[in-house]
Amino acid sequence: MVGKRSVMIVDDEYLARDELKSLLKRRHPDFEVVAEAASAADAWVLLKQHPRIDGVFLDIHIQTENERAGLDLAYVINRLTNAPWIVFITGRPQTAVEAHRLHPAHFLLKPLEDSRIDEALEWIRQKQALPVVPVFSPPKRIMIKHRIDSRFDEYEWHTECVDPGEIVFIAKNKSVNNLKIQLSNGNMLDRVNGTIKDWENRYAVLGFVQIHRSHLINLSHLRSLKPRGSEGEDYKVALKNCPSELAVGPEYLEVFREKLHKGQF
């Protein structure tokens, strides 16, 4: 899959913005317009809202502000950490001298020509590398601290080294703010700190999905989804290596079915 560059267009003329946006979508789909502005002031606000913008197509002469508003914005952009590249756009060639002092990625004259835009974007593809997205490496072991109760109201804290694939389901304990974790070997780790949402956010990529407000399951252990009847919940799941069947909350059913349909386990 081709990586995309997120870009912003800054031009006080709507038709000019629309024309460039249409051209990028038609001829250069790897440059995705995620924001557009009619003034330098609006553009600066959007840049702070979209910190991952890779580049800015910037009109130098913004008539609603002043004839060097684009240049002033470029100076501010260049002071940003990980500043986006800039392609200046103007109908006034005489502004090119100062504009080039800002080391833009390219400089385009109005009216825009397809061949010039093609040339500029190909230069950017070659010179401006896309940011490297770190690849998530699933943990081979998860350290889980849990409590073991003994006689006379005493207890000990143990730390279990668990392969994520061994986890069958995670359930919220009633009346207390902690969890219990069912393992495929039959062991249950109790009084584990954290919330259901914490576990789903952290390990969704490993196949953990919430199916009820009180529990989530490891999809790799799913055996079946079946109607529950008239007991208040619509469906329940049966899991491998586990005698328990867990209810599926109505508000989670649609997303759960979608993951099953896509084979996300």
Image (cartoon, grey):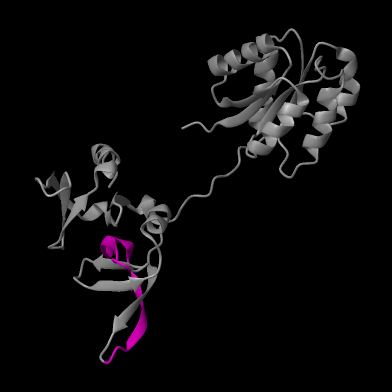
Q: Is residue 222 above or below residue 44?
A: below
> On the picture, is 34 further left or further right than 100?
left
Q: Which of 249 and 206 is in front in this view?
A: 249
Residue at image x 28%, y 57%?
Answer: 215
| x and y percentages locating residue 158 in the rendered image | 36, 81
Is residue 122 in sight in this rendering? no
Q: Which residue is nearer to you in this view: 193 or 187?
A: 193
- Residue at x 22% of width, y 73% of height: 187
32 left or right, relative to 78: left
Q: Which residue lies furthest to the left in this view?
A: 229
Residue that appears at 60% across and 41% down? 131
Residue 265, horizontal then vertical, whole percent: 27, 47
- Residue 244: x %, y % from top left: 15, 61
Q: Is residue 209 magenta?
A: no
Q: Residue at x 10, y 46 (%)?
A: 230
- Position of 245 with respect to 104 (left or right) is left
Q: Is residue 14 visible?
A: yes
Q: How many labels does the image show?
A: 0
**Foreground of the two, 209 or 161:** 209
- The residue lying furthest to the top in this view is 111
- Which range of residues does the magenta coloring cover? 152-175
| Furthest residue toward bottom | 152
Can you say whether 217 is above or below 128 in the image? below
Measured as percent of width and height from the top left, residue 147 is found at 33, 79
- The reply to whether the magenta stretch includes residue 172 is yes
